[in-house]
């Protein structure tokens, strides 16, 4: 976007380092990666370059919740990220630690580092991950660190407190890593990648040819009994960890405690790369003593002789509740200061990438005095993520799921480019080649749809296929587009049966037949969700008056007064999604808006 940017990081060698699982994407998360890619971000391209196994998750359900996922080579991913960063002409690097943010007249002016250097800047984005006052826990052992083997950062939290920000503590964890040479693969269940894998990036024409398998095993009652012997020394149960952990990615000790009726839990053994034997034990996140971890692992089927390379550990760190942010991810207190990633209470590479991208976009917009770019909940999962953080806040690590998006039929992973690439081009993030690819895809879909609407199929042409998929044969000629609406019918074999083809596909384009089939089958749902999105858009266009004393509005519920005073919503739409604001409270706010703006009153009532 033309801004001269300095990236300050503790270690240049750690750029792109995958702190936890060497994988990108998944259900909900994969949607975000494709949206980041559609806007010109590098995560999808790096994943495609470093991927060693690709799978589309949730295929047994509807395409709205399919989620691409790639197991990556940890070293190759970091290499791809660094190469992409170093290809940016206006991006500069510095190995240092930021200890404070500098301000003048209430605005950000730059940062100070531990080396005593003051660096001037008109916009600053803090993306501190788990490093701010980070503390690592392994059993009774506790030491400072942002990751195992990397030190924590000090000073920045205190600086932000002095600027008026409030912070909290969160916790996350990671499982042990083991030597793959010590595993008995004959006792494990193999999980292969997709035979025809889907890239993350809309710019990828092909993927690495070499795909490896992951392996599945399970814990057992005997494993659980061993783990329980370490509960007394568990920092979580002993109360040494004060921060809340991720609800949807609990530690193995938390699983045993919360789901005591279950006698086993599934584990995925995931290779860390093509040139290493290190294996990530997904599902076994723990902070129990190292000897307890080792003994428990050796009671798991296929791991009886396992050698542990690194123990699992928990990490506690500072975050800043996101009600202190605007939708641009700019802080409310200090103009020019932006937060992105785990500092806002999220967990996961994908959620952090989305916030980093939007904070970067809006930092440049702030410098050029242009309106910020804010995606709506109907435009993308990135919009859902940011709105959830700002409107609802979080007191536990936030993770994206498709269930968080009420418009998820509109927000499929396969149409992220159709939704967002034009915006990326307008912002200067997307090259003409990418934009042309998106147009070719859109044109192919449109041409195929138009041609199929003219096709009538006869019983003798399609009945053998219909009978093969156990659906009612035709008794008379029928429009092809009506036949596609049957749940059992797939467009590609149907077209083959009648000798038809889709419009010609461009390089790297997804299967046009599948895209068209999805559009046809979900047309009614899409129409309804677009209508709902338009209704919500009217609420979003109604700005709340500034500096409202919500505490004085006695017609609001006490919970609404408390939450509204804390969040200070910018629009009626945001106010409607704040936890604790009821329909009755929203009616009061609508009246308030109508009194401050006659035009707003007519728009809201419409």
Image: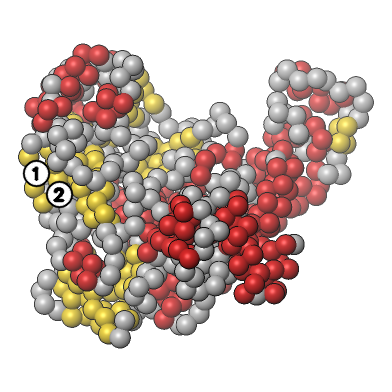
The Cα–Cα distance between marks 2 and 1, rounded to whole angstroms, is 7 Å
Q: Residue at x 80, y 43 (%)?
A: 452
Decide which of 193, 565 is in the foreground and name it: 565
Percent across and percent down for residue 47 are 39, 49
Q: Quadrant of residue 313?
A: top left
Q: Quadrant of residue 442?
A: bottom right
Identify the residue position indicated by label 2 in the image.
135
Q: Is residue 592 left or right of residue 299?
A: right
Percent across and percent down for residue 547 are 47, 73
Question: Pointers 2 and 1 in contact (CB under 8 A)?
Answer: yes
Dot 2: few (<14), some (14–19), or many (≥20) neighbours within 10 Å? many
Q: Residue at x 48, y 65 (%)?
A: 552
Find numbered disc 1 in the image and state the secondary structure of the residue it sits on. Answer: strand
Q: Residue at x 33, y 16 (%)?
A: 261
Residue 410 visible within the image: yes
Q: Residue furthest front?
A: 554
Dot 2 or dot 1, earlier in sequence: 2
Decide which of 155, 516 is in the foreground and name it: 155
Identify the residue position indicated by label 1 in the image.
142
Q: Quadrant of the N terminus?
A: bottom left
């Amino acid at each position: 976007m033309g801004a001269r940017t300095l990236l300050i990081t503790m270690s240049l060698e750690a750029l792109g380092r995958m702190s936890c699982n060497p994988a990108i994407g998944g259900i909900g998360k994969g949607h975000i990666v494709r949206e980041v890619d559609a806007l010109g971000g590098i995560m999808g391209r790096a994943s495609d370059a470093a991927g060693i196994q690709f799978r589309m998750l949730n295929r047994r359900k509807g395409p709205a919740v399919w989620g691409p996922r790639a197991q990556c080579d940890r070293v190759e991913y970091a290499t791809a990220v660094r190469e992409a960063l170093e290809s940016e002409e206006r991006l500069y690097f510095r190995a240092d630690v930021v200890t404070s943010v500098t301000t003048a007249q209430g605005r950000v002016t730059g940062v100070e580092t531990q080396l005593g250097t003051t660096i001037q800047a008109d916009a600053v984005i803090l993306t501190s991950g788990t490093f701010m006052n980070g503390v690592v826990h392994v059993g009774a052992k506790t030491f400072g660190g942002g990751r195992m083997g990397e030190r924590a950062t000090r000073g920045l939290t205190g600086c932000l407190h002095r600027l008026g920000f409030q912070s909290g503590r969160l916790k996350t964890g990671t499982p042990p890593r083991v030597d793959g040479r010590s595993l008995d693969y004959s006792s494990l269940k193999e999980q292969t990648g997709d035979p025809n894998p889907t890239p993350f990036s809309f710019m990828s024409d092909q993927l690495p040819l070499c795909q490896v398998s992951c392996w599945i095993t399970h814990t057992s009652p005997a494993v659980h009994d061993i783990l329980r012997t370490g509960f007394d020394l568990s920092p979580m149960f002993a109360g040494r960890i004060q921060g809340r952990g991720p609800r949807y990615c609990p530690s193995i000790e938390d699983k045993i405690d919360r789901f005591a009726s279950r006698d086993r839990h599934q584990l995925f053994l995931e290779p860390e790369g093509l040139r290493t034997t290190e294996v990530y034990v997904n599902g076994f996140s723990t902070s129990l003593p190292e000897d307890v971890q080792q003994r428990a692992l050796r009671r798991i089927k296929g791991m009886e002789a396992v050698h542990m390379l690194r123990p699992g550990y928990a990490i506690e760190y500072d975050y800043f509740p996101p009600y202190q942010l605007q939708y641009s991810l700019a802080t409310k207190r200090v103009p020019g200061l932006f937060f992105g990633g785990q500092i806002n209470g999220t967990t996961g590479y994908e959620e952090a990438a989305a916030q980093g991208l939007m904070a970067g976009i809006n930092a440049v917009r702030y410098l050029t005095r242009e309106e910020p770019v804010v995606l709506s909940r109907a435009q993308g999962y990135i919009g859902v993520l940011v709105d959830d953080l700002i409107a609802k806040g979080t007191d536990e690590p936030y993770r994206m799921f498709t269930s968080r998006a009420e418009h998820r039929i509109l927000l499929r992973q396969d149409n992220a480019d159709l939704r967002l690439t034009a915006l990326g081009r307008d912002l200067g993030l997307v090259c003409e080649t990418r934009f042309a690819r998106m147009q070719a895809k859109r044109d192919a879909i449109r041409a195929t749809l138009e041609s199929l609407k003219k096709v009538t199929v006869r019983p003798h042409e399609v009945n053998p296929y219909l009978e093969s998929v156990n659906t009612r044969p035709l008794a008379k000629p029928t429009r092809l587009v009506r036949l596609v609406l049957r749940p059992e019918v797939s467009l590609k074999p149907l077209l083959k049966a009648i000798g038809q083809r889709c419009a010609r596909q461009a390089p790297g384009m997804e299967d046009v037949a599948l895209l068209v089939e999805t559009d046809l089958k979900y047309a009614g749902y899409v129409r309804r969700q677009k209508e709902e999105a338009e209704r919500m858009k009217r609420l979003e266009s109604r700005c709340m008056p500034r500096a409202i004393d919500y505490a004085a509005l006695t017609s609001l519920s006490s919970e609404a007064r408390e939450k509204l005073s804390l969040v200070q919503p910018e629009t009626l739409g945001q106010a409607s999604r704040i936890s604790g604001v009821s329909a009755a409270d929203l009616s009061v706010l609508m009246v308030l808006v109508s009194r401050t703006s006659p035009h707003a009153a007519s728009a809201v009532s419409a």
